[in-house]
Image (cartoon, rainbow, N blue to C red):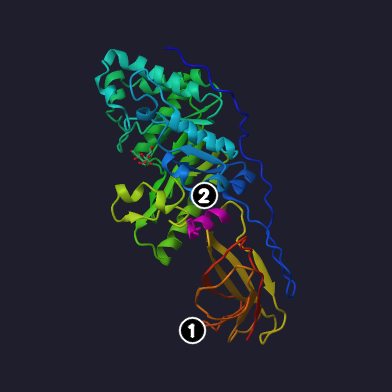
Amino acid sequence: MSAPAGRARRVLAAATAAVVGTLAVGMAVAAPSSAAAEPTLGQLAAAKGRYFGSATDNPTLTNAPYTAVLGSEFNQITVGNTQKWMYTEPSRGQFDYTQADRIVAFAQAHDQIVRGHTLVWHNQLPDWINSVPAGELLGVMRNHIANVAGHYKGEVVHWDVVNEAFEEDGTRRQSVFQQKIGDGYIAEAFKAARAADPNAKLYYNDYNIEGIGAKSDAVYNLVKSFKQRGIPIDGVGLQAHLILGQVPGSLQQNIKRFADLGVDVAITELDIRMRTPRDAAKDAQQAADYRAVTNACLAVTRCVGITVWDFSDGYSWIPSVFPGEGAALIYDENFAKKPSYWAVYEALGGTTTTTTTTTTTGNNGSGCTATYRAVGQWPGGYQGEITVRNNGTTALSGWTVKWTLAQGQTVSSLWNGVVTTNGQEVTVRNANYNGTIAPNSTVTFGFVGSSTGANPTPTAACTTA
Ligand code: 9MR
């Protein structure tokens, strides 16, 4: 069977153009603040010539709070499951794109580029593959690739052509393709993908190849040999299903050595799992880990983008496969942004300083600064935090921060401070344990509240008493 013609080609911008505004940092006394809209991770990444994306799966496309984030925050989507062989060719020669087409249509409607995932993998195969005679499997594989990559021709910017073909020690995984076609199956798959969609970037994708080691060496040698032999390959996907505190120290060096072979690199399935439940220390470590991965990618020009393997802890594969572990992503179950989100945001060049007001009066010469940060928001609620900084040369012995709530905002719970409210006016004084702030040091308090409407970021003012 020959490949069907590609569907109508859409012009896919390499990255969504974005105007990334610098968020206002007022340093004048009682500076008024206009709450500038914060850029998204996709916009920040685009400003650095990259994408920041998420995988998604069909069941969540009907979840409105979920799709609100999916459609706005990211400029790239990976089809998490439904382009896999069991979905696209459930019976030999019978192709079905119903589900994957929905995800591609969602991405196109939201100006998001699509990574195709995945053409040849040992997992999520239909049962019939196992009974294909050895002499027929190469033809079956070529036909599958011709059809699937042909169907999405012009609509997928990257294809994960072959996924997870190596064992941890760098030997070939004994998949049905390896056993029945032999070592040459990977090259044959890439040649078939190039023929089906000449403009798609063709990736080899795997896990545990983020750092330098036996497995990544095997992939390195594969890419090197493909380049020498003229086999088409454009990129290597480092899945990056990582464990808290264990970002490989050689990540950047590894990205660089692949780039030096003349291929792009993408972080394709990032998540960083922890023992649940979360706590502040684990969240902080996770934020540092996400920051390290983002920085490693940004440090190498050919690292073209980062994809999280779904974005909300409520929609992650981790808890079902690693019991007792989870909380691996950048939004919590309620779509509130986690510290890991803000770490990526900052690494991509965003500033989390949303409003700042300085008072020049005070008992320490130069007063203090209150910096309000919108930590997260979800339908009906929000979380904020305010950092108080001592700008003076002598220690502060107490501080007070005031702000005015917008219509529809409340503060319902606050920690690391003592709150009083009077109508829309909020006053927070230091708790008995954090009134003293050394020069150039900070204290942070946090709060959650309800909100209806736009939930703008207020301007907070600080005084030294
Ligand atoms: O997220 C996918 C999950 O829903 C599937 O059950 C699972 C089946 O193996 O595949 C998951 O995605 C995998 C991806 O396709 C390849 N790399 C590892 C991912 C996590 O298992």
* x and y, in percent, of residue 291 in the image: 50, 54
Give the quarter of the figure containing the C terminus. bottom right
Q: Quadrant of ligand 1?
A: top left
Residue 155 vs residue 22, the one in the foreground: 155
Residue 183 seen in the figure: yes
* x and y, in percent, of residue 114 in the image: 52, 35
The residue wearing badge 2 is 294
The Cα–Cα distance between marks 2 and 1, rounded to whole angstroms, is 36 Å
Instruction: Please tell me which of labels 2 and 1 falls first in the chain.
Output: 2
Classify residue 460 as left or right of residue 99: right
**Residue at x 41%, y 53% (from the top left corner):** 313
The residue wearing badge 1 is 433
Dot in front, 2 or 1: 1
Instruction: Characterize the local packing of mark 2: few (<14), some (14-19) or many (20 or more) Cα atoms within 10 angstroms.
Output: many
Residue 315 vs residue 274, the one in the foreground: 315
Whether residue 296 is situated above or below residue 27 in the rendered picture: above
| Helix, strand or loop at mark 2 | helix
Q: Which mark is residue 363?
A: none
* x and y, in percent, of residue 127 in the image: 27, 26
Q: Which residues are magenta?
A: 335-346
